[in-house]
Amino acid sequence: MKAKLQIMMLRRVLGLATLPTLAIVLYICFILFSIRVKLPLLSSSNTTDLVTKPPRLRAQFSLLIGILTRADKYNHRHFLRLLYGIQSSPQADIDVKFVFCNLTKPEQRVLVALEIMRFNDIIILNCYENMNSGKTYMYFSSLPRILPHQYDYVMKADDDVFLRLAPLALSLQPLPRLDLYYGFVIPCASMNPFVNYMSGMGFLLSWDIVEWISSSKILANDTFGPEDKLVGKWLNMGNKAKNRFSNKPAMYDYPGTNGRCSHDLIPDTVAVHRLKRWDQWVHVLNFFNVTKELVHSNLYSVSFNG
């Protein structure tokens, strides 16, 4: 009797309910059901992972590497893009840019423009192409004015040097961020970075020294001569770079190319200089197993393991 009474009351309620009311009730039931189904997917282990997952390590310093080259060296520039594009360092934010003087040929204006549009990694200085007639001065002195932001360090490198970015960053990590001059001291047999100058293969200055070069009127009138030797002269003349570091034997010339500046390849290498031929590049890249991260794929019909 009681059951019949409940059924009659339910029929009465449903009879009184309007369609909008039923729609609202059904929608609320659907939402509640959905929540109930989805909640188990967020298990305690999943939520814990979300909370405790360590954040990405923040870089400790920034570095701009300017590779001084010439506009016509398109193929070599593309090769170096590949080489530096697959390298990184957790310690540093590293930007690699190619540096040359004003464009002088119609094809340069088109092809270099395409490179800039695609890669945005080119600096064109207001100068005529040269090695020892002010290009290095123009490079350093222009940076505070043309860059959108400053870096902790700025490096000048040749286009025949292979830089290993991770070891380079590790070697810079404990060094001062101010008044720093870093590289491979000349003469080759010297271990004293406070005598003479750093080789043009690749030397680095802290940003405060770059700003000093940019603002010094004395240096603006002393820009002709061997560019690496000239930089050492500037720093001595201005009583700059009280912090100096020569990274030997990690920086050197390719074996057999330059007397006492050369030695065999070593695992802790930061820079190898005087890579003039493809066989030399291949030897170096194989020694450091640069392609070890290549992922196997059925798309490759050739073996990369020799």
Image: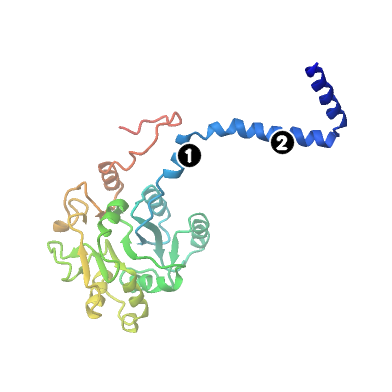
Residue 252 coordinates in the image, percent (x, y): 21, 56
- Foreground residue, 119 or 89? 89
Q: Is residue 250 left or right of residue 207?
A: left
Residue appearing at x 30%, y 51% in the figure: 166
Q: Is residue 161 visible?
A: no
State if disc 2 and disc 1 touch (CB < 8 Å): no
Residue 162, label in figure: none
Look at label 2 and name its amino acid. Ile
Residue reaching furthest left?
A: 189
Q: Is residue 262 left or right of residue 15?
A: left
Secondary element at tag 2:
helix
Q: Is residue 5 visible?
A: yes
Residue appearing at x 36%, y 30% in the figure: 303
Residue 47, label in figure: 1
Judge depth for marks 1 and 2 and give the one in front: 2
Counting other residues with Cα less than 10 Å from the Cα at mark 2, is it few (<14), some (14-19), or many (20 or more)? few
Determine whether 49 is above or below 85 in the image. Answer: above
Specify which label sits upstream in the sequence, 1 or 2.
Answer: 2
Look at label 1 and name its amino acid. Thr
Determine whether 248 is above or below 178 in the image. Answer: above
Q: Is residue 43 left or right of residue 286?
A: right
Measured in 3D between alpha carbons, the distance from the residue under mark 1 to the one under mark 2, in whole angstroms, is: 27 Å
Determine whether 159 is above or below 34 in the image. Answer: below
- Foreground residue, 54 or 227? 54
Residue 28, label in figure: 2
Residue 178 coordinates in the image, percent (x, y): 29, 70
